Image (tube, helix red, strand yellow):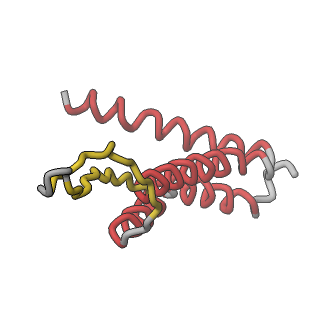
Amino acid sequence: MLPIVLFVGLAPIALLVALQVWLCRKGRWLGLILPGISLAMSLLLVLSVASFGALRTTTISGGVNVLSPNGEEVVAQTEPEEKQEIAFHPRVLAATGILFLVSNIPTVVFGGIWLHYKGDRKSVV
C-alpha cells in the first residue's frame, strides 16, 4: 500500500519538475512560466488566509436597563448587532509568514531549475 501512496504523491511532483526542465531547455523565458504560476498561487493562498484570519466578527447582544412606569428596573432587549473589524493578531501574522514560506517551496525549486539552465549555452535564447 505504501508504494502506491508514494507513487501517487510523488508522480505529479516529478512530472512538474520534468516539465520545468523541458521548458527551460526550450527557451530562457519559457522557464519562468511555472515559477510565475507557483508564486501567484502562493500569494493568492497567503492573502486569502490572512484576510480571513484578520477579519473578526463580534456579535453584540443588547440589553438596556429601563425604568418601568411603576418604578421597577426592567431590562429591555434589543436586536443583536454584528460588528466586523480587522485586527492582525501575532498568531495570524506568524501563521501567515509560515504559510508564505511553505507555499513558496515550489517557486524556489522551479526558480532554481530556471537559474541552472539560464546560464546554459545549449538552451535556445
Count of labels shown?
A: 0
Q: Position of residue 73 (x, y in %)?
A: 14, 57
Q: In the image, 91: left or right of 69?
A: right
> In which quadrant of the rendered view does residue 33 lie?
top right
Residue at image point 37% right, 48% down: 81
Q: Nearer the viewer, residue 88 or 77?
A: 77
Residue drawn 87% across the image and 52% down it: 125
Q: Nearer the viewer, residue 12 or 38?
A: 38
Q: Residue furthest bottom?
A: 90
| Residue 21 placement: quadrant | top right
Vertical position of residue 18 compared to residue 51: above or below: above
What x and y, as percent, mark residue 3? 25, 31
Say which residue appears at 80% left-offset and 46% top-offset. Answer: 27
Q: Quadrant of the N terminus?
A: top left
Q: Is residue 49 found left or right of 125 in the rendered image?
A: left
User: Viewer-proximal residue, 113 or 98?
Assistant: 98
- Name of the residue lying farthest toward the right: 125
Nearest the eye: 48 or 43: 48
Horizontally, residue 89 falls left or right of residue 2, namely: right
What is the x, y in percent for residue 100? Answer: 48, 61
Residue 121 horizontal/vertical position (percent): 81, 58
Q: Quadrant of residue 117?
A: bottom right
Q: Is residue 9 above or below residue 100?
A: above
